[in-house]
Amino acid sequence: MSEVFLKTPRTQVRRLPQRGAYDRQTAYAILDEGLVCSLGFVHEGQPYVIPTGYGRQGDFLYVHGSAASRMLRTIEQGVPVCVSVTLLDGLVLARSAFHHSMNYRSVVVLGTAEKITGDDEKLRALRAIVDHLLPGRWEEVRPPNDNELLATSVLRVPLEEASAKVRTGPPLDDDEDMGLSCWAGVIPMTLTPGAPLDDPTLAPGILPSAAVESYRR
Amino acid sequence: MSEVFLKTPRTQVRRLPQRGAYDRQTAYAILDEGLVCSLGFVHEGQPYVIPTGYGRQGDFLYVHGSAASRMLRTIEQGVPVCVSVTLLDGLVLARSAFHHSMNYRSVVVLGTAEKITGDDEKLRALRAIVDHLLPGRWEEVRPPNDNELLATSVLRVPLEEASAKVRTGPPLDDDEDMGLSCWAGVIPMTLTPGAPLDDPTLAPGILPSAAVESYRR
């Protein structure tokens, strides 16, 4: 498998091309840090963009949902999809309205979703999705039973045609604005976990695992 | 303007319908808290989902970008779009793999983007986008000049056909799993601003405004 994606006219970053990246390492680090993807598909000419959890294993991205879901029933038919993941890193406050921006890391994947049919790959994919939330969680919980497996559709999107886009650093104001008296800079933004909240039905004496206690994204 | 959205088969929440909401108040609170939207459109049969900033004023959502952008040139032709905004509130860790979930608040908007042509509405829209990042920022910075206005395309999406979807609360495990010894609960997640970082070129003595210093989302 090549270490870089196929760079096609469809995934080439046109606006501010210096922000584009086409290597798997950059894109996979973003996909592995993100928690929610935006899954785009077309149904009767209308685009839909649905937020959903996901997991990655190797060069596939996995999404799952109810076997009865309209979204999954549509995209499991082998239609083109687009999956996008964005991490917001900061608000870029320039001296001019025009140069306001955000610092971010994003990945856009184009491809065709494939429905997973074998139970073994389905279980591996569900494990990737659960462990994506919290590494090691799969080993702590009850695995899916046959009924749950039947009720769950899992799709995979090959990570072949994709690109990343990254903006970092301070605002880039025009020379003639540098004398303005307005403050300029960046407000960093971070997705921060809080202290774990016990399920109200939790039996006394059951404590969060170390992985839950020390959760960091 | 009605206080509830048109509830169409296209925006009706089918999976877990009890999580759906169709009132403007719920949806606008989510749109106003979010910073990045996922903008979906179709080009030559392929769906694209592009993350971008936005603003809301009244019953319109505004996005902007370079007049030369492929995305904006495509969607300004009056094609159907889908805009989705998701706020992640927590990881829901159940006793079974099957019941793992996330707490979130999301909005999905369907509609047709319209290109704004008048300079007055364009300026109001750009103000909404800048003030969406940081309320009051527009008054602190240099407004767009004629060249910048020309170089910027602004589109509006009417907030008419939309729905919100919200999950809150603890995991919902099956009765037969309540005796498992595994911890269950929620790890809350919050998008947290850090201390403002001065632009390295900032002149000595220029301090962040109170709005920057006390930034909270």
Image (cartoon, coloured by chain):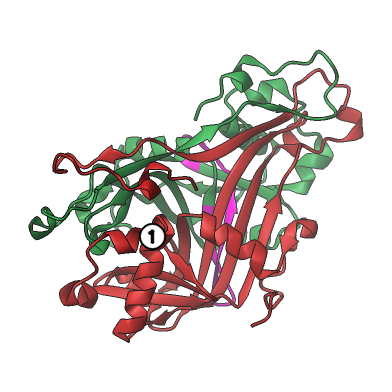
Chain colours: A green, B red
**Residue farthest to the top, as pictured:** A205
Q: Check disc 1 and report the residue beneath it.
A: B136
Name the spot of residue B57 as percent of width and height, x first. 48, 72
Q: Please, is residue B93 above or below residue B120 in the view?
A: above
State left or right for residue B85 relative to residue A115: left
Magenta-span inclusion, residue A53: yes
Name the spot of residue B4 as percent of width and height, x first. 70, 74
In the image, which residues are magenta? Answer: A38-60
From the image, which quarter does the N terminus of chain A lie in?
A: top left
Q: What secondary structure is marked by label 1? A: loop
Magenta-span inclusion, residue B184: no
Query: Which picture quadrant has residue A110?
Result: bottom left
Q: Which residue does the image show at 33% across and 38% down from the upper left?
A: A26
Q: How many marks?
A: 1
Q: Please, is residue B202 above or below residue A131 in the view?
A: below
Q: Please, is residue B164 above or below residue A30 in the view?
A: below
**Residue farthest to the right, as pictured:** B175
Q: Which residue does the image show at 32% across and 48% down from the upper left?
A: B209
